[in-house]
Image (cartoon, rainbow, N blue to C red):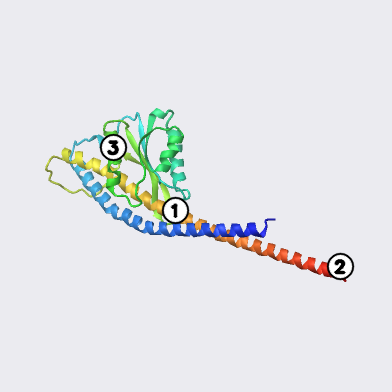
Amino acid sequence: MASLRDIKTRINSTKKTSQITKAMQMVSASKLNRAELNAKSFVPYMEKIQEVVANIALGSQGLRHPMLIDRSVKKTGYLVITSDRGLAGAFNSNVLRQVYNSIRERHQSDDEFAIIAIGRIGFDFFRSRNINVALSITGLPDQPSFTDIMDIARKTVGMYLDETYDELFLFYNHYVSAIQQDVTSKKLLPLSNINTVNKLTSYEFDPSPEEILEVLLPQYAESLIYGALLDSKASEHAARMTAMKNATDNAKELIDTLTLSYNRARQAAITQEITEIVGGAAALE
């Protein structure tokens, strides 16, 4: 049985740990409020640019653009969004597991795909398994702006246009609520789902529709990447807040258990001392 000093030391160290996890929980909760607002505020922009692009593409008969056309797939790109830090429960492991399983199911050779990694956890995961990481970015702020990822977003879209890969899949955690984040995978390029707009609007074009789409389509694809990043950041803060809350609750339960053990050990020690005193007194009679 552990000594009273050992139990007391464990209680004190667990209390200090619970103070840290509680502080991290409060910090993540504060970041979550702003991240959730950022993610929701970006949705109207994404919906509007999709509507405009779809109307131009559908309203111009015979118009063809490389980003709208399916082509023979020789190489696939996977854009994976993770965090730079851990202590977020299964936030990173869930998305990485799904990406890894998808790669192993679809490809026989490492030459058939490439990874674009946003976040250090994902970058380290693929590098440790000798999987090709074509592009990566780490150290993004908790509330990223488009400027922070503009370079990698444009390079990612550019790699599709120059046929470095022929399709691009996006993997990230979609924010549902503070206690639910769903791993989401979707085909980002080519933009095959852009024809989902039901209401067509007539536009007068200046310059031509081809020139307009040449600018708008890459911007739309880049906005999808940025929107997924905002969504993932909200999920990250929510997952870390939940993980730290669970850690704090577990620490409190452990403290209660250790306190009970400490009291029992202390009571046993006092009882033993009383027994020895009574025994000594009886021996003197």
Closer to the observer: label 3 or label 2?
Answer: 2
Closest to the observer, 73 or 4 = 4
- Residue 183, x across and y down, in percent: 42, 46
Q: Amino acid at mark 3?
A: Lys
Q: CA distance from mark 3 to mark 1?
A: 30 Å
Q: Amino acid at mark 1?
A: Arg
- Toward the bottom, the furthest residue is 285
Q: Residues within 10 Å of mark 2 (few under 14, many from 20)?
A: few
Q: Which mark is residue 283?
A: 2
Closer to the observer: label 1 or label 2?
Answer: 2
- Identify the residue shown where x is 42% and y is 41%: 122
- Residue 49, x across and y down, in percent: 23, 48
- Residue 168, x across and y down, in percent: 34, 37
Residue 276 higher or lower than 225, as above or below = below
Residue under label 3, please give it. 155
- Classify the position of the C terminus by image quarter: bottom right
Residue under label 1, please give it. 240
Where disc 2 sits, the SS reads helix
- Identify the residue shown where x is 48% and y is 56%: 244
Q: Residues within 10 Å of mark 3 (few under 14, many from 20)?
A: some
Residue 264 as seen in the image, left or right of residue 127 = right
- Classify the position of the N terminus by image quarter: bottom right
Mark 1 and mark 2 lie on one chain; the one further toward the N terminus is 1
Residue 18 as seen in the image, left or right of residue 2 = left
Q: Amino acid at mark 2?
A: Ala
Where disc 3 sits, the SS reads helix
Q: CA distance from mark 1 to mark 2?
A: 63 Å
